[in-house]
Amino acid sequence: MKRVFFLVIGSFVFFALLIVLVSFAFPSHVRISRAIDLQVSSKQARVTLGEPTILSEVFDGSFLPTSQTITDSTFHAEGNKAAAIQMETGWQLIDGRSETSTLQWYIDFYFDWYPWEKFASLLVEARYGSVLEKKLQVLKTRIEAAH
């Protein structure tokens, strides 16, 4: 009976350590990025992106930034530092030919060393990639309609 007990406990410890070691192979920082071409100049797009209401429309309450930095061609916001998974987001406006520009949007996720968080990093692209594409399409429509 004692041997079976130690076999069960030893197996449990071995597999727990194996899972932790395998999780170290997964990244603790994941960046998801999407881009869309706009049929307006970057100067015109900057005007719309600088509106105070644009953040509430794009994020619709799902992301409340604790700090944000806005320059002439970039926007960067950090999420709640007390959250389990840290998140930062932002966009960059890139000049194109004549009256075109490209809007790139990214989300950075930072995971702790816990195995369940590291394994969750594999699912981030599938979950947030399509959301970024839809939100970029909304931004494109709004920017191009304004000009």
Image (cartoon, rainbow, N blue to C red):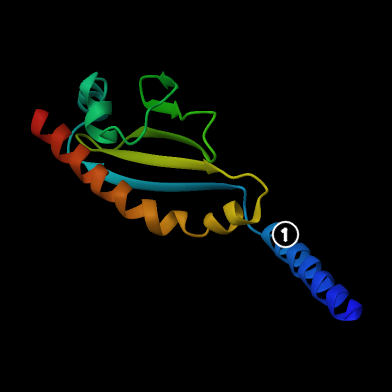
Q: Is residue 136 above or below residue 91?
A: below
Q: Which of 65 and 7 lies nearest the eye of the viewer? A: 7
Quarter of the image with the C terminus is: top left
Give the residue at mark 1: 20
Which secondary structure, mark 1?
Answer: helix
| Quadrant placement of the N terminus | bottom right
Q: Quadrant of residue 8?
A: bottom right
Q: Residue at x 29, y 34 (%)?
A: 59
The answer to whether residue 147 shows anywhere in this view is: no
Please name whichever residue, 69 or 23, is drawn nearer the observer in this view of the structure.
Answer: 23
Using residue 6 as the reference point, say whether residue 147 is left or right of it: left
Residue in the picture at 31% in, 54% down: 130
Q: Residue at x 68, y 60 (%)?
A: 25
In the image, farthest residue toward the front: 1
Q: The disc labelled 1 sits on which kind of residue?
A: Val
Q: What is the x, y in percent for residue 19?
A: 70, 64
Question: Is the residue marked by circle 1 packed among few (<14), some (14-19), or many (20+) residues within 10 Å?
Answer: some
Q: Is residue 36 left or right of residue 31?
A: left
Number of numbered discs overlaid on the protein picture: 1
Q: Is residue 118 above or below residue 140?
A: below
Q: Is residue 61 visible?
A: yes
Q: Quadrant of residue 97?
A: top left
Estimate the x, y position of residue 47 in percent, counting from the top left.
22, 21
